């Protein structure tokens, strides 16, 4: 066992063998040997050995624990349940084995058996937790039941009765048990009963979370529409803590609900269960004013009361009544708020919510008013900037700059003004670095936002057609990153811009330095996986897919462990959350995309190069009939707002953009998934054809295989049509919004037509195969024509890859990432063409050898060769010539890229300072090297494909 722990598996196997020589029947040694075998990649031997021991139904703890570890490593948790089922039969009173059995069921989600195991445990050892394990398993059955009616009429009422029994016998001990009771009542929509539980004696156990009882009461009052109670409770909690924002919202919601219902308090008794109720606007206004007066006496400044006043104004305006309540002018209130909290980074996000209370005509005046109160040091000379003297003043100034961007003041400027603002922001950024000299490497610089805002302005200019601006963006961001090496915003923005320019190489390093954890592989992984493969960085693409897939696959295993911990510690309300989390990841759009692209990529790099297409497809256990993508439940878990943006609402990413992006991603995924399934169908058409009058064709399954392929082809046609319709909308996402898919390029460069006609060709060749060469002149001609038009289409596609990848225009660089993407599509399309060709080859070869046999028999010199052979030979020769031409073209590109002397670019832009020039050089070098790398990888792959063409000469 020590050897196993230290990772020395070979020694562990040797030691186990020694032991087994002495004691043939030592179970535990066998299992430990199996673990060693499993870890050295001998899965089959390990499994056989383990089953040998399992068949004996061991009951010693060591063997059981060791087998559990082994099965977990094999990803076969269902075998653990069998193990403990047998152990429990033999040792029926073991608490330990029963609880292991319960946890084994939990790992595989067998809720019914969990319920039974829980009760069996409780009978052996009457401990409360075991009883409630059983109750929770009933709730899990209700959650997972497809039929909602069943869960409301059977599972939940049963769970409720089980808990009521414990309540009646006064056996409720722990907080978790009360939580569970509340959860059942809430799911049964028995809100009144749930409220009674929380407010009653049982509710006193709810102590672990702050305000746990109050929050639960509030939730029930809302469900029951008991607005007087909502209001009184919120009021009471705000008197305790006037900074708790959620209760302001409830307070306002309930006041206006009561006003709309014309509710009046009863004359004699209490207003409500929770005490006094406010049911008029006057009371609300006074209440907020009192909170502000109270706040002025508080030892630390509280933001809540001031923001609540703005919130009340907004709601009153919304109802069309504001002026008579004299709450003040929003502009003045925001100004006062800025004076009080302007030096806190949260000031901007607080005010952002309320800027729509300002009339647009007042924007400039408002900003000027704010600038006037910031203590900036007097400027030394006329044309110099007034700079902040300390961090507080810097924060205040930054807040104003962010508000200016949000109010669209910068957007409205001319190019010249914008450039002046960029200069100013960068000066302020560099000046602000002085305040952060003592910052650690992991801390952000105080003035980082200046640099980000300058980059946003330059991005505006770039989109308006100013080519040089994008290089300046990269320059400033790289400079920013050098001072603030852990600023995620700099890295994310660099990733997006490098990808837009078609340079993937610098991105890998940036992304790994972000150190994305756990769920982030799903939420921001798209930044990486969208571009790696499509820009020709095949190795990096494989790696980035692996990162993501490793996370998705381990999620399955990890979630089971979390659920088990939740049972152990009685955190029952977390269990449905873990299940929902697991489902959310399993139906993740990104997971489906990465799975599909990963398999296509593996085929592209290996099929018919290092292994045959058939073997590659087998190792992925792919089959054309199976579709494992949950189309109906696809979840878009991408975080599209991960990049900061200070844009006004009309320029920012909207709900509509999200919907369109999801639609586009799903359409593209459908096309890719169908392409993959069609390719996986090629080896199934292998050579097992009977003569055409035999009746066996339907039985041996091949004819149904071609039907599958034809059906998939129709689905692909439909998906392509939907894709084209979608693109007709000409959707434009914001520059920092979701990146568009590769669909537009796929259609416009002709890859789509090529790939579809290749699959039609498969159908024709199959027909030729079933009909034989005799009377198939028409099919042969059709195939010949297909070959000709394919070569034309592929040549067209190659023509769309021609041109300089990087060109220098008026001293500025311009990159052409679309040419790179086209090249990548060309490689993929030619690979599919070759897989189809090798199918043609497998059909034509036997025909040819038969003909040659006939020739020998008849001893004739001229048995006429059917035309399809010459067609195929010509086709293969032309493919070979075309591929060689592309390889030569790529060599040319490599030479041009190497010769491109970027240093000599006259960086005549006088705006660039000396230190910026150094970063510009780095940035341009990175882009050049990345393009060089892409072209090299594409070239290498094409050379391997060229070798496979040479083998196709029949």
Image (tube, grey):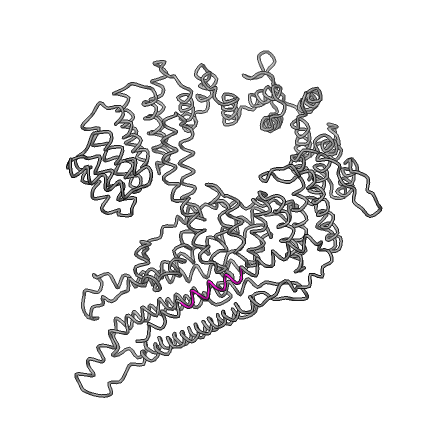
Which quadrant: the N terminus? top left
Q: Nearer the viewer, residue 562 or 738?
A: 562
Q: Nearer the viewer, residue 394 or 522?
A: 394
The answer to which image quadrant residue 99 occupies is top left
Q: Is residue 698 visible?
A: yes
- The image shows residue 66 at horizontal and vertical percentages of 26, 35
| Point 39% across, 70% down: residue | 946
- The image shows residue 153 at horizontal and vertical percentages of 35, 30
Residue projecting furthest to the right: 382
Residue 243 lies, with reference to residue 676, above or below; the image says: above
The answer to which image quadrant residue 560 occupies is top left
- The image shows residue 514 at horizontal and vertical percentages of 53, 44
The answer to which image quadrant residue 276 occupies is top right
- From which residue to which does the magenta span run? 930-943
Which quadrant: the C terminus? bottom left
| Point 53% across, 52% down: residue | 507
Q: How many marks?
A: 0
Residue 454 lies, with reference to residue 117, above or below; the image says: below
Q: Is residue 251 magenta?
A: no
Q: Nearer the viewer, residue 577 or 429?
A: 429
Characterize the magenta stretch by its predominant secondary structure. helix
Residue 176 lies, with reference to residue 576, above or below; the image says: above
């Amino acid at each position: 066992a020590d050897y196993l722990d230290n990772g020395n598996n070979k020694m562990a196997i040797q030691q186990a063998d020694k032991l087994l020589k002495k004691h043939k029947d030592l179970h535990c040694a066998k299992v430990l040997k199996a673990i060693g075998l499993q870890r050295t990649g001998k899965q089959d031997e390990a499994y056989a050995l383990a089953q040998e021991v399992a068949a004996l139904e061991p009951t010693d703890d060591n063997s059981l624990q060791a087998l559990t570890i082994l099965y977990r490593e094999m990803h076969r948790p269902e075998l653990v349940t069998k193990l403990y089922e047998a152990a429990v039969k033999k040792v029926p009173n073991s608490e330990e084995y029963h609880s292991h059995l319960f946890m084994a069921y939990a790992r595989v989600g067998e809720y019914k058996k969990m319920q039974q195991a829980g009760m069996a445990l409780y009978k052996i050892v009457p401990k409360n937790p075991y009883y409630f394990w059983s109750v929770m398993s009933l709730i899990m059955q209700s959650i997972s039941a497809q039929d909602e009616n069943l869960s409301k009429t059977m599972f939940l009422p049963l769970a409720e009765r089980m808990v009521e029994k414990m309540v009646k016998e006064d056996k409720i001990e722990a907080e978790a048990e009360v939580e569970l009771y509340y959860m059942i009542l809430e799911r049964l929509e028995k809100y009144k009963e749930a409220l009674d539980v929380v407010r009653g004696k049982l509710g006193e156990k709810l102590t672990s979370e702050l305000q746990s009882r109050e929050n639960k009461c509030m939730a029930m009052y809302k469900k029951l529409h008991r607005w007087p109670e909502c209001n009184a409770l919120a009021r009471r909690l705000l008197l305790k803590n006037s900074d708790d924002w959620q209760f302001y919202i409830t307070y306002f919601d309930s006041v206006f609900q009561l006003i709309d219902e014309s509710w009046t308090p009863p004359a004699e008794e209490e207003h409500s269960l929770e005490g006094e109720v406010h049911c008029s606007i006057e009371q609300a206004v006074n209440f907020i004013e009192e909170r502000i007066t109270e706040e002025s006496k508080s030892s630390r400044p509280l933001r809540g009361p001031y923001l609540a006043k703005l919130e009340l104004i907004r709601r009153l305006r919304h109802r069309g009544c504001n002026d008579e309540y004299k709450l003040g002018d929003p502009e003045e209130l925001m100004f006062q708020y800025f004076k009080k909290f302007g030096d806190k980074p949260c000031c901007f996000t607080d005010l952002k919510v309320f800027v729509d209370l300002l009339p647009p005509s007042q924007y400039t005046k408002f900003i000027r008013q704010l600038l006037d109160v910031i203590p900036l040091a007097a400027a030394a000379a006329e044309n110099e900037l007034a700079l902040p003297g300390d961090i507080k003043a810097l924060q205040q100034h930054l807040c104003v700059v962010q508000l200016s961007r949000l109010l669209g003041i910068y957007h409205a400027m001319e190019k010249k003004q914008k450039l002046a603002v960029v200069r100013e922001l960068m000066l302020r950024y560099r000046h602000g670095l002085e305040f952060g000299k003592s910052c650690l490497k992991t801390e952000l610089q105080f003035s980082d936002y200046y640099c980000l805002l300058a980059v946003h302005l330059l991005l505006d200019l770039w989109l308006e057609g100013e080519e040089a601006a994008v290089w300046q963006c990269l320059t400033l961001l790289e400079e920013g990153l050098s001072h603030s090496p852990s600023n995620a915003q700099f890295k994310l923005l660099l990733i997006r811009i490098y990808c837009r320019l078609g340079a993937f190489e610098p991105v890998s390093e940036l992304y790994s330095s972000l150190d994305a954890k756990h769920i982030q592989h799903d939420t921001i992984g798209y930044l990486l996986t969208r571009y790696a493969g499509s820009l020709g960085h095949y190795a990096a693409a494989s790696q980035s897919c692996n990162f993501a897939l490793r996370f998705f696959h381990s999620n399955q295993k990890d979630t089971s462990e979390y659920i088990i911990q939740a049972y152990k510690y009685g955190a029952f309300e977390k269990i449905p959350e873990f299940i929902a989390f697991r489902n959310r990841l399993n139906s993740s759009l990104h997971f489906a995309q990465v799975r599909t692209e990963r398999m296509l990529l593996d085929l592209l790099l290996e099929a018919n190069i290092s292994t045959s297409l058939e073997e590659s497809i087998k190792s992925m256990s792919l089959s054309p009939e199976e579709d494992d993508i949950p189309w109906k439940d696809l979840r878009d878990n991408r975080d599209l707002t991960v990049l900061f943006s200070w844009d006004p609402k009309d320029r920012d990413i909207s709900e509509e953009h999200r919907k369109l992006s999801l639609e586009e991603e799903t359409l593209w995924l459908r096309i890719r998934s169908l392409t993959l399934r069609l390719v996986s169908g090629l080896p199934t058409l292998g050579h097992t054809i009977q003569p055409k009058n035999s009746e066996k064709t339907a039985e041996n399954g091949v004819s149904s295989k071609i039907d599958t392929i034809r059906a998939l082809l129709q689905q692909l046609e439909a998906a392509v049509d939907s894709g084209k319709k979608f693109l007709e909308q000409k959707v434009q996402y914001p520059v920092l919004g979701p990146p568009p898919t590769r669909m537009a390029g796929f259609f416009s460069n002709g890859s789509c037509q090529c790939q579809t006609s290749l699959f039609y060709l498969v159908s024709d060749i199959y027909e030729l195969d079933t009909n034989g060469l005799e009377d198939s002149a028409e099919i042969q001609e059709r195939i010949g024509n297909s070959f000709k038009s394919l070569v034309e289409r592929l040549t067209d596609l190659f023509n769309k890859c021609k041109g300089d990848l990087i060109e220098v225009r008026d001293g500025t660089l311009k990159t052409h990432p679309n040419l790179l993407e086209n090249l990548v599509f060309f490689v993929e399309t030619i690979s599919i063409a070759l897989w189809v060709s090798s199918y043609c080859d497998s059909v034509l070869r036997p025909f040819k050898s038969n003909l040659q046999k006939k020739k020998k028999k008849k001893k004739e010199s001229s048995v006429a060769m059917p035309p399809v052979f010459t067609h195929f030979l010509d086709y293969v020769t032309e493919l070979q010539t075309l591929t060689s031409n592309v390889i030569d073209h790529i060599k040319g590109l490599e030479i041009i890229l190497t010769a491109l002397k970027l240093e000599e670019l006259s960086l005549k832009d006088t705006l660039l300072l000396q230190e910026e020039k150094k970063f510009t050089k780095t940035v341009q070098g990175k882009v050049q090297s990345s393009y060089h790398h892409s072209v090299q990888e594409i070239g290498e792959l094409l050379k391997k494909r060229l070798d496979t063409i040479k083998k196709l000469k029949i």
